[in-house]
Amino acid sequence: MSENKTVLYSYWRSSCSWRVRVALAYKKIKYEYKAIHLLKDGGQQKTEEYSKINPMKAIPTLEIDGHIIGQSLAILEYLEETHPENPLMPNGAYERAIARQMMQIIGSDIQPLQNLKILGLVGQYSGDEAKKAEWARTIITNGFNGLEKLLEKHSGKFCVGDSVSFADLCLPAQVYNANRFNVDMTPYPNITRVNQYLLTIPEFIEALPQNQPDAEPQC
């Protein structure tokens, strides 16, 4: 590992990798993209070679400044602290707390409960593949119900007022997953509005799944 080289281990459709790609784009950090396919060969994240990089056998992993960091939310915090230019959090303590609250609704209460690993277990233990989509819709709907109310109170152009925050970095991937699992977005006008605005911003466009080197044709 070189201290001068930044490397992102990512998968084109990974929600957690997506957040980090947006942050790197905002911070203007150039990096090498190393694709880790979550399905091919039984999941390339499970290999012995990759487990030496990330013992949780998960993505993303970021090599930066001579360090190796896993967990997307930890990576966002590191980038914000070490690269304060183009800030990704509001100035006020209360506003930062709200941004983190929203971020954790997505990053702790929704996405981990409907990710590839959990959906595989739902299918395995239920014996019914159709239950996977039903489970995902339930988890996303429960989380979006709370997030929508927070956005109603705190959002402007972005999730918290009119400046980008960690919450925004997490939102597009979760809306993408909601659409994948046919979640009815009608009850979530603020989520939809903010997400549509985010998808007009160059840094968010750069991070889209279809713009990644390992993107697959069905994207």
Image (spheres, grey):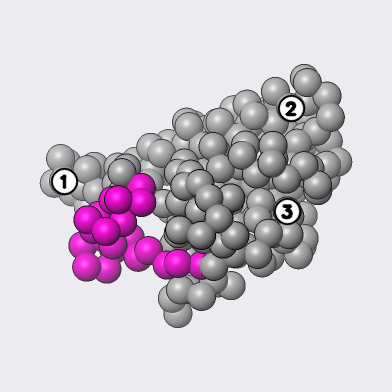
| Secondary structure under the numbered disc 1 in the rendered image | helix
Amino acid at pointer 3? Lys
Circle nearer the N terminus (2, 3): 3
Task: Decide if residue 76 is in sight here.
Answer: yes
Circle nearer the N terminus (1, 3): 3
In this image, 148 relative to 182: left or right? right
* Circle number at residue 124: 1
In this image, 215 relative to 132: left or right? right
Name the residue carrying label 2.
96
In this image, 159 relative to 38: left or right? right
Rounded to the nearest whole Å, what is the CA distance between mark 1 and mark 3?
A: 41 Å
The correct choice, above or below, for 147 with respect to 62 in the image is above
- Chain part drawn in magenta: 33-54
What residue is rendered at 80% in x and 33% in y?
90
Amino acid at pointer 1? Gln
Quadrant in which residue 111 is drawn: top left
Q: Is residue 176 magenta?
A: no
Foreground disc of the pair 1, 3? 3
Name the residue carrying label 3.
27
Closer to us: 124 or 66: 66
Q: Rate crowding at label 2 as few (under 14), some (14 to 19) or many (20 or more) other CA atoms within 10 Å.
A: some
